[in-house]
Amino acid sequence: MCGCKRARWFLPALLVLLLAPGSPAQQQQAQQSAGKKHIVPFDVDFARFRSSDSTVYLESYLWVSRSKLDYKQNKSGKYVGGFSVDVKVLEGDSIVNEASWRRYDLADSLSEITESVRIPTVGYLVLKPGKYRILITVRDLNNPLAQGQWLSDPVRIDVFPADSLAVSDIELATNIRSSEEKSEFVKNGLFVQPNPTGLYGTGMQVMYFYSEIYNLDTDPGKDSTYSIRYRILDGDGNQVRAYPAKVRIKKANAIADVGGLNIISLKSGTYYLFVDVTDNGTGEQASSFKKFYVFRKGDYTKEQLAQATATADKKAMTGAGSPGTDAQRYDVMTEKELDKEFDYCRYIATRQERKIWKKLDLQGKRDFIKKFWADRDQTPGTPENEFKRDYLMRVEMANRNFGGFREGYKTDRGRVLLMYGRPDEIERFPFSMGHRAYQIWHYYSIQGGVDFIFVDKREMGDYELVHSNARGEMYDPDWQRWLDPNR
């Protein structure tokens, strides 16, 4: 079990008594749309934490604006609103786990019931590894006809490794402080107010975040410290901020980490926060990243703001969503920058596309690369191109982890990472007197299960592919001969 502690605590049931209505005149004044059918929009986000070696602790974060709910005045003159949340985890057509809870809210006057005041809540589920969809339904407690619903795309839930350094998902927050109170927002002695939109900017100049680090080596014979570093990348995978690494003492093998970064100088756009951890006793490294957004009206023209508002309104009609803006940089990129990004795509571009690229001028390349990514967008109806985002993020990972004499995306491991995605499991075998260092990457859901074997032939940290059972890849059943240090 993880040494990190969580409190499961919800508002007392006695709050239901506060819903006792006042006079008919007061009810008529307080109710905004009671009895009318309408959608309750909400923002939602998730984060995975370790529960045990075989299960994952899934936290769900929601925000509902006060202005989307009906409020009733009680006998004490307060206005009371609230909503229920029902979370179902689906495997195929079966419900494998579910959770339900209620969240109440008090306002002193009707003037406090505004769009800008959002009511946060947190839910918890323990899941085994698997591929799931998550269905969330939010209902107005004062109006049974008002509700919002959201169904996720299929998402794979994997457990965290039991014997190697790992970092949980990152929870974005509007505030983090020490607390001894009992609350749904308290864990590890910290009050963490979630920000499920991931949106910062005007009014929120500091981005707070929470994560957990697992499997630090606390052997007293080894270095007792670990290093943690934060980085910010833009929507195209370019690093825009790199903060100095902080060296900390290992107080346990599982540790909670919190941070706060001033993002006042970031322009409106999509960004990624990276948390990189190094165990200084073993040299092991692990990372986690999270998408967030910055939005400031001053960065946009009136026409752009109108378009963004229309998009946001359309998303709100579905009942859930997270705002954001995709970086559009191609119209100002140099030809050298465009060539570099297209070279990142060498493994997914067709031969014809590569031929066309060589013949284009600057404007032609700008137009071509926009279409190149648009043709590969698996969800063209959404503002963000998830395929492009994930691919360029893997380029950044390859360059950071596999680079040396050449850029990481040009190495064998970089190519496999970009073509096949992240492996489900990596076996690492360090150098010994009996064999060279090598790695085995396992993909369990591709072609019925495939492996890639990389050997550090030259003993210089450049692992080369020597064997794979994937179709079209190097096949060498006698690959173990490359392990001989004397070869």
Image: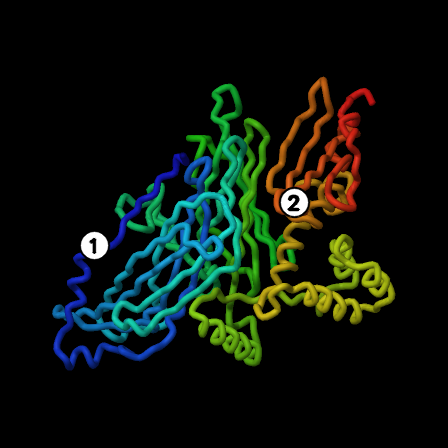
Q: Amino acid at mark 2?
A: Gly
Residue sitting farthest toward the front: 93
Counting from the top left corner in percent of width and height, residue 110 is at 25, 75
* In the depicted structure, whether residue 27 falls above or below residue 256: below
For residue 448, the mark is: 2
The quarter of the picture where the N terminus appears is top left
Of circles 2 and 1, which is in front? 2
User: Crowdedness of circle 1 by 10 Å Cα count: few (<14), some, many (20+)?
Assistant: few
The answer to whether residue 255 is left or right of residue 330 is left
Callout 2 environment at 10 Å: few (<14), some (14 to 19), or many (20+)?
Answer: few
- Name the spot of residue 77 as percent of width and height, x first: 15, 71
Q: Report the residue at 72% width, 41% height from top.
A: 413
The answer for how far apart the CA atoms under marks 2 and 1 are is 50 Å
Q: Is residue 469 left or right of residue 77?
A: right
The residue pinned by badge 1 equals 12
Q: Residue at x 61, y 69 (%)?
A: 380
Residue at x-position 26% and y-position 62%:
104
